[in-house]
Image (tube, helix red, strand yellow):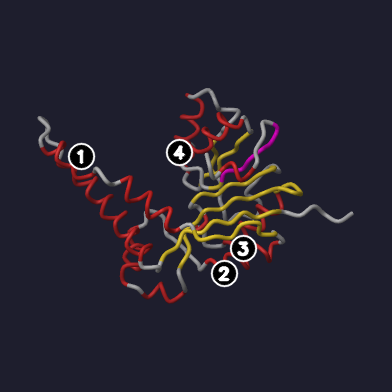
Amino acid sequence: MSMSKLLGMTSKMSVAVIGASLGRPSRVLASEFGAWITGYEESEQLAEKGMELSTKAGLDSKAPIQHYDPSSEAPFERTFDRGYSKEALYTVEDKPKLLTNIFTNLKDSGLFLINDYTLGSMDSLGNKDVQKWLRQEPTQPFPIPSDVMEKLLTDCGYVLRMNEDITDQYIDVIARSWAGVGEVIESLTNHSENQSDTIQRLVKEAEFWMLRSKILKEGHLKVWRFLAYKPSEIK
């Protein structure tokens, strides 16, 4: 919610959410701001399930979730006032094409808010923990340094109103989110029914996030925020 306020959304605006997953952020934005949200998700399975959840919530017209191909020539069927991408671009291989398509469909004076994982430097790809993280990601990542992303955005024609490192905030969120995992595992261990499969999945997920936190703390991986503005055409 606090991040989304940077977009200055109103109930009259249309918003594209890139990397919508199951669509919860899209539904929150539609409910809180009244904006017309379209969530775009690369996974057909997640998009289908996300649309089911939006329909169940009575937001099938206000926050639909649909499948899209970020590598296609024209992935968006309409224009929009705002764009929002939360940790979605780092898994896109052809970033210039997608960023250009978003720019084309973003209305003049529109804003595009991006939070994304970026490399500390290209040398970070040689780090063994980074390599392990890349292998463990459920979707193949294609991370780039923040200065490379900055150039891709400005080459499209965006003007950057915000360009900042928010890694420390994410490290804190990870720490707080997993603070009670030991108690949860203990509770599952003492459960009357066998919870070994659940414990195994939980431990695996915790190890994944601890690895991500480690490379964030060491500076090999960063979390960066961009607020990009599309200037009005000069008449």
Q: Nearer the N terminus, badge 2 or badge 4?
A: 4
Q: CA distance from mark 2 to mark 4?
A: 29 Å
Name the residue: 57% across, 65% down: 149
Q: Which residue is mark 3?
A: 96
> What residue type is disc 4 on?
Leu
In this view, the residue in front, 146 or 40, is: 146
Say left or right for 56 vs 209. right
- Region rendered in magenta: 12-17
Residue 148's tag is 2
| Residue 110 image position (x, y, % from top left) | 71, 48
**In this rendering, which labeled residue sits more in front, label 2 or label 4?**
2
Q: Secondary structure at mark 4?
A: loop
| Residue 31 image position (x, y, % from top left) | 55, 29
Q: Nearer the N terminus, badge 3 or badge 4?
A: 4
Say left or right for 177 vs 202. right
**In this rendering, which labeled residue sits more in front, label 3 or label 1?**
1
Name the residue: 40% across, 72% down: 125
Q: Which residue is mark 1?
A: 184
Name the residue: 62% across, 46% down: 83
Query: Any magenta on residue 146?
Result: no
Q: Secondary structure at mark 1?
A: helix
> What residue type is disc 3 on?
Pro
Q: Which residue is mark 4?
A: 22
